[in-house]
Image (cartoon, grey):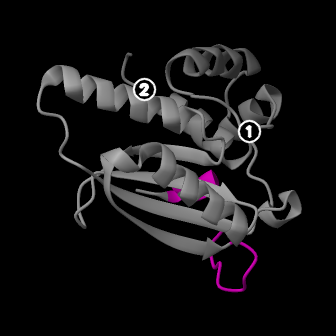
Amino acid sequence: MNQLKPLDYKILFELMKNARVSDRKMAKILGVSQATVSRRRAKLEKEAIDGYTVIPKWKKLGYELFAITFVKIKQVAGSKEKYEDVRKRGIEWLMSQPNIVMSGACRGMGTDSFNLSFHKSYADYDEFMRNLRLEMGDLIDNVQSVLVNLSGSELLKPLHMKYLTKAK
């Protein structure tokens, strides 16, 4: 991918604030033609935009918990083939879990990987963790989770991409 141009960043930031903004309105905000915005957006959609999504009000959808789960994986990969088999099995399990919205390797706190997931209730989360242990327990050394009450008064800054538009 080519390096992004300053106009590309401006378009991305406007889309992060509001993905529904029209090319016409964005052109007016940025002081360029609508054709320029449309052309740059099409290129960005191929090279730099992974998709458009909605950030819902979780409670309205029935989700009460957000879980940040850290996993320490057992050292079972004694060979490259074994490592690839373990990795493939892990990815297949992760992709079959619709509650997990992001997962990957990480370092720190004695962990190897993390999962970000949403759950409708503690019972739903408990079932999710039970299934994790039943289906992947032979590969897991330790699991730690942090639970966030999505409907509580302590959720001080809700998840949103618009905040990144002001980052330096």
> Which callout, 1 or 2, points at the residue further toward the start of the chain?
2
On screen, residue 110 versus residue 3, left or right, reads left
Which secondary structure dominates the residues rendered in magenta? loop
Badge 2 amino acid: Leu
Horizontal and vertical percent for residue 30?
A: 66, 37
**Who's the residue at 51% across and 38% down the image?**
94
Horizontal and vertical percent for residue 154?
A: 65, 85
Q: Which residues are magenta?
A: 150-166
Query: Residue tagged by mark 1?
Result: 19
Q: Are marks 1 and 2 in contact (CB under 8 Å)?
A: no
The image quarter in which residue 24 lies: top right
Placement of 87 over or under 139, stated as above or below:
above
Placement of 19 over or under 82, stated as above or below:
below
**Who's the residue at 46% across and 61% down the image?**
69
Foreground residue among 67 and 29 = 67
Residue 4: image tag: 2
Residue 100 covered by magenta stretch: no
Badge 1 amino acid: Ala
On screen, residue 55 versus residue 47, left or right, reads right
Q: 10 Å neighbourhood of mark 1: few (<14), some, or many (≥20)?
A: some
**Who's the residue at 27% across and 24% down the image?**
84
- Looking at the rendered structure, the secondary structure element under dot 1 is loop
Horizontal and vertical percent for residue 88?
A: 38, 26
